[in-house]
Image: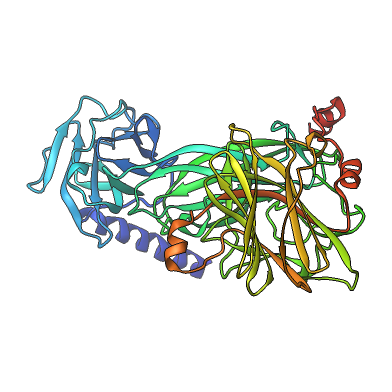
Amino acid sequence: MIVRNLIKFSLLAVAVAFFCGCDDMDSLITSAGTYKVNARVNGMPMDECSFVGLTDRIYPYFEENVSDDPDVTALMVYIKNSNGEVIGKKVLYSLYEAAEEDELLIQVKNLDTDLPFLPVQGSLPVGRYTMISQVMSGKDILQRNEKIFYYLGNTVFSYKGINVHLPGITDNNQVILKETVIMLEAKLDFESRLDPYVIWYNGRKKISEGKFSEGAGYLLWKAPEESGFYTIRAEVYPIDNYIGLTGYQKETSILVSSKTTAMHLVTENTAQLVNWYVFEGSLNDSKLITSADRSIKPAGKNPKWLSFDGTYGVAAGSENVYTLPSSSLSGEETQKWQMLFRFMPLGEGQLFFVQFEPDVFMYLSKTGLNLVLTLTSSDNSVSHVVSIPEKTSFITAGVNFSFSSGLLSARINVLGESVEQGELAAEPVSIEAKVDKFQVSLGAKKENDAESAVQPAVTAIWDEFALYNTVPLEVIKSEVKQKAVYEPSEADIVSSN
């Protein structure tokens, strides 16, 4: 018993000595949440967005009333840079206390209302800063809080929202069919000296992140098999060093339907189909997805996915060329092939080219409101011209070409919005050529540096491309299914709740 009492007395003596020793120094209460101090920028708490512009003002405030607390007499606020140096003077919002020489006194009637703005940020260089607030009782510090913010100055950086882009053949943008790959775009407006950092979330799960310059502003998202509403959110920052900052946040709700609908020009069961690409976030052959040797190869770059007017596809041009696997010819005397495709022209220039021999090529180009199909060899060049609609939209077209008795022949058919709207073109154009294989490339062929400078970086967005062997157009017409306009059923809505 005597020992136990001695221990209690010793602990009490230590506690008394500790608190008595604080008489000559600032006391710091570190318990979180004792006094909730925050700041507003453009009416928004800094906890929700920590970016400050040139004309923005920081307004410190207590989240809960402190007027009934006799210990609280002032709030001191000041800013430190990334090196820990205090910028400007410390600002003391005080009921009656005088300020020190290095402090700016702002006397207030009470601390519960919004305090005057912090008069320091106008002279700050662009960068990360820490706002420090100290709840004061006379000269003692009751609590110290820190909030990190990024000062933008007059740098342009705004976040308008998330745009949803569907595959080019999709008619209904209100419902996403299961397993469809859509493109989500964080719509940002910023100056070239910034490289924003974007983080994507599916619900609370982080699914992608990176710098805008590396393509992180876009997300290719595959809809799940289960129907329902899915929330995709993107949080953006002006820099990649975002730790401690709260970014701009926007989200979009997506309704996924479990109904299966044919939404492409052909199917994997189409007769004599050699290659088929639907460009839904992938360059894989849609007939044999797992076959790497059947995938399209970009010319030394990652594929460039581009959105336009609510749709998206793979962008091709002089700077983005995509090469299909080589196709060999059989020993038959006459062979017929066809390319069927959907694309949206974005500018004049070459759309694709086919190499048959070292000096024998087929080109499809856009000039004005015309598509020009050209066959060239070392000593000959012939062309076939067809008109296209003036309104910019996805175009369905087909190119028939054949080999017979040393003659390469080709013709193009513009088919409107579906294959059944098309009519066979006039007589094909032909040149002499001996061919045993060929290879298709989407984009513009670079002859030399001068020729490359003339070709636009992007000439078209490609939505679908199919290559057939010995299939006449009439057979293809009978196999193509009409696009389905789908409205959400009551079962889809119920299952999403």
Q: Position of residue 154 (x, y in %)?
A: 26, 42
Whether 268 is drawn above or below 497: the answer is below
Q: Is residue 38 left or right of residue 172?
A: left
Q: Is residue 451 visible?
A: yes
Q: Quadrant of residue 409?
A: bottom right
Say whether residue 204 is visible: no
84 w.r.t. 359: above or below:
above
Instruction: Answer left or right for 221 relative to 75.
Output: right
113 vs 21, nearest the viewer: 113
Residue at the spot 75% in from the left edge and 39% down from the top edge: 415
In the figure, is residue 253 to the left or right of 471? left
- Relative image position of residue 65 (x, y in whole percent): 37, 29
For this rendering, which residue is in front, 329 or 84?
Answer: 329
Residue 408 pos. (x, y %)? 75, 63
Residue 370 quadrant: top right
Foreground of the two, 114 or 6: 114
Residue under the image location 13 percent in, 37 percent down: 105
